[in-house]
Amino acid sequence: MDARPTGFSRVTAPQFDPVVRLRDFTRSFGDNTIISGLDLDIAPGEFVILLGRSGSGKTTLLRTLAGLDPTPGQNVIVPASRAVVFQDARLLPWKKVWRNVALGLRQGDVRQRAEDALREVGLGHRLDAWPLTLSGGEAQRVALARALVREPSLLLLDEPFAALDALTRLRMHELVLSLWTRHRPAVMMVTHDVDEAIALADRVVLLDHGRIVLQERIEAPRGERGQVARALRSRLLGALGGQVLEGPSPAEIIALHAGGLA
Amino acid sequence: MAISHRISASLGSARWLSPLLFLLAWEAGSRSGLIPERTLAAPSKVLSTLLDMAVSGELADNLWVSFLRIVIGLAIGVTVGAVLALVAGLSRQGEVAVDPLMQIKRTIPTLALTPLFIVWFGIGETPKIALIAFASIFPVYLNLYSGIRGVDLRLLEGARSFGLSCAEQILHVILPGALPSLLVGLRYSLSVAILVLVVAEQINASAGLGYLINNARDFMRTDIIVVCLMIYAVLGLAADALVRAIENRALVWRPSIVAQ
Ligand SMILES: Nc1ncnc2c1ncn2[C@@H]1O[C@H](COP(=O)(O)OP(=O)(O)O)[C@@H](O)[C@H]1O
Ligand SMILES: [Mg+2]
């Protein structure tokens, strides 16, 4: 494909075929253009966080990657195996927890696979519970299990922890990271929380008015991001048009992710 | 003092007290001749008539006839209503075809069709069952149809994102989601069916509760009339209990029931 001899950049940054590839992607509702001219690649196993203000088009982009919206005539490549975790867990209230996880599975011992997935998210004891009896955090863990049991090559998360309290949210971060480490799907997670983005991402993509205005790759290992966090945080907040508050909060959150809560 | 006080307090809050006093007053009125038997039989007389009719089998035979009319009429009506609701609820073309007709049907009071049904079906069992069936279509149709249309689109979208086929979405999401509405419709259909039964059985019946009442009217047997009224009330209560039992089984996942 590439006729040129192997270049330097190619050696230092080996190119995989991306699992997601958008070129000049545009999405509008009527006259209202929400996303325009957007290019995005996501490598296999990459953890991308999509950051942006409310109404900036994050959900619209995620729905496109999920295949929930039609994209006629657009240059959009997404993998066939993908799974979505929505902000509201969207469990079917009339199916027990394990049946929700097993929904749509066709091969193998479906019950066993659902059980294993639920054990992995720490809900082995709630297999036969009704969804409406779960707490918000538990429901979201079921939604994670339901997504991961499909072994997707692309995992899409739309503000999955926005409705949870701070401590539960930190626990969920640990859980997502450990699941991601074990299964290695490419992840695109939407959030409007800058600290969440810094703590979790390989790469932060900042969306504003349907355009990518900033991308930051974070090389530092998770848990050792204390030094880079402050500068990164002010760059991201600056691009978001927000005010940068001086304070210990980001460092603390990053430190929490260094191990204390696992 | 304290004990009599407590007794009067507990009597004051007893809900069974006023019906009992009412029955006693009624009985006293009958015994004293204030209420003639041709106007209204005494409760004691009603009770003994009930026992006589139960022992002789007269009650069971006629109740069975009425019961069959309701069950057959309901079975037909509920089935037709549910099928039409599925057609209209699950497809746009179905809605365009079915819903206008059902809305027209709704404007015609079922009982006003009685003369037409007699002309068509004669005076046997058919017009009675047809009236019950016809009346019970609409409550089931309307509730199931709106239940299907009211299914949470976000749940449907979630199911779609996990690759469920159209048939699977109907089976796992739409139908269970519409079930509570269907049960509401069923409840209305049952009470409408009993109402229509009362009128339909006035059509020259030779058996059934309506026949008993008509006969009793001709002989001014107010005791038998009251017995039949009681049976109608019991039928209504039984219908309600039936739907509630179905609900408790089918909707165990609901929080109010889960919480118990
Ligand atoms: N189905 C739709 N029809 C019309 N407008 C929509 C629709 N979905 C989203 N939008 C609009 O697109 C914009 C971006 O929405 P969204 O992607 O949900 O933002 P975010 O998730 O970043 O908060 C909003 O202004 C919203 O009103
Ligand atoms: Mg959103």
Image: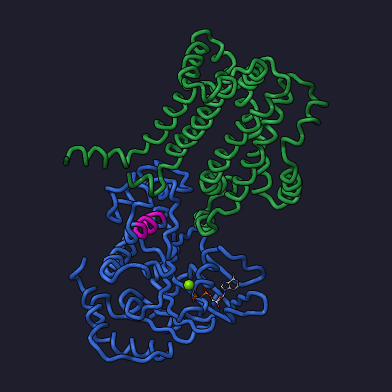
Chain colours: A blue, B green
The residue segment tinted magenta is A139-146
| Residue A48 figure quarter | bottom left
Q: Nearer the viewer, residue B30 or A243?
A: B30
| Residue B211 figure quarter | top right
Residue A249 in percent (x, y) is at 25, 83
Q: Is residue A122 magenta?
A: no
User: Quadrant where the C terminus of chain B lies?
Assistant: top left
Q: How many marks?
A: 0
Magenta part mainly helix, strand or loop? Answer: helix
Residue B257 in percent (x, y) is at 38, 44
Q: Residue at x 24, y 73 (%)?
A: A257
Q: Residue at x 33, y 38 (%)?
A: B14
Q: Residue at x 44, y 63 (%)?
A: A86
User: Quadrant where the N terminus of chain B lies?
Assistant: top left
B122 sits to left or right of B10: right
Farthest residue toward the top?
Answer: B56
Q: Nearer the viewer, residue B73 or B191?
A: B191
Residue A148 drawn above or below residue A191: above
B193 sits to left or right of A6: right
Q: Residue at x 73, y 23 (%)?
A: B203
Is residue B168 in view? no
Residue B114 in percent (x, y) is at 76, 31
Q: Nearer the viewer, residue A88 or A176?
A: A88
Farthest residue toward the right?
Answer: B119
Residue A12 in percent (x, y) is at 38, 80
B173 sits to left or right of A118: right
